Amino acid sequence: MARTLIVRDDRGEHHASIDDNGRVSIDDVVTPVVTVAPGVVRVGDGAGRTAWVAAAGDVRWVYLDGEVFEIDVLRPGSRRRSASAHGLLSAPMPATVIRVDVSPGAIVRRGDTLIILETMKMELPIRTPSDGVVKAIHCRPGDLVQPGVPLVDLE
């Protein structure tokens, strides 16, 4: 039985599924995925590419080729969360602030990187979910931040 997933990246939202043989289909493109160690998978035919995975509940973050993808695992009968409920302007897991790329008053566009976090030796960009103006920043480089705590306020 295939599991249904929603994949989010800076280009938007993509519908995906995983079948019982480990094949992942994203927007109707099928890709083999093999787990090689806890938190590490190989993606693609042949040698494939290595991806690192972190999880919290039904949310997964996949680091592949310099990009981070957020994946929601949709359980049968569960309701899908809205994009605004994902804490896009908060840390997905405990992390250290590496860089803050904006300041209060900055005009930002959907997908702009606001903050770079580091967790589990991978960088996680915090991107704006919509156009807006930065109202406040609640962290600085070197801070240890926790999941769900707002890092940036947008207007």
Image: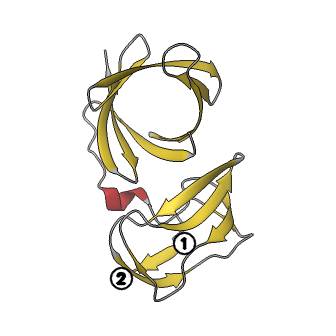
Residue 74 in the image: state x and y as whole percent: 33, 35
* Amino acid bearing label 1: Leu
**In which quadrant of the rendered image does the C terminus lie?**
bottom left
Q: Which mark is residue 155?
A: 2
- Residue at 56 percent across and 60 percent down: it is 91
Residue 88 in the image: x percent, y percent? 44, 61
- State the residue at coordinates (57%, 67%): 115
Is 89 displayed left or right of 1 in the figure? right
Identify the secondary structure beneath mark 1: loop
Query: Which percent across, then down, holds residue 119?
Result: 67, 51
Contact between labelled residues 2 and 1, with CB atoms less than 8 Å apart:
no
Q: Residue furthest bottom?
A: 105
Image point 58% across, 73% down: which residue?
101
Label disc, if present, on residue 106 of the rendered structure: none
For the point 39% across and 12% down, the residue is 20
Q: CA distance from mark 1 to mark 2?
A: 14 Å
Left or right: residue 122 versus residue 48 is right
Looking at the rendered structure, the kind of residue marked 2 is Glu
Residue 24 vs 77, above or below: the answer is: above
Q: Is residue 154 above or below residue 19?
A: below
Quadrant where the N terminus is found in the figure: top left
Give the residue at the far right of this rendering. 142
Instruction: Report helix, strand or loop for mark 2.
Output: loop
On screen, residue 100 versus residue 120, left or right, reads left
In the rendered image of this protein, does residue 70 appear above or below residue 101?
above
Residue 55, quarter of the rendered image? top right
Residue where numbered disc 1 is placed? 151
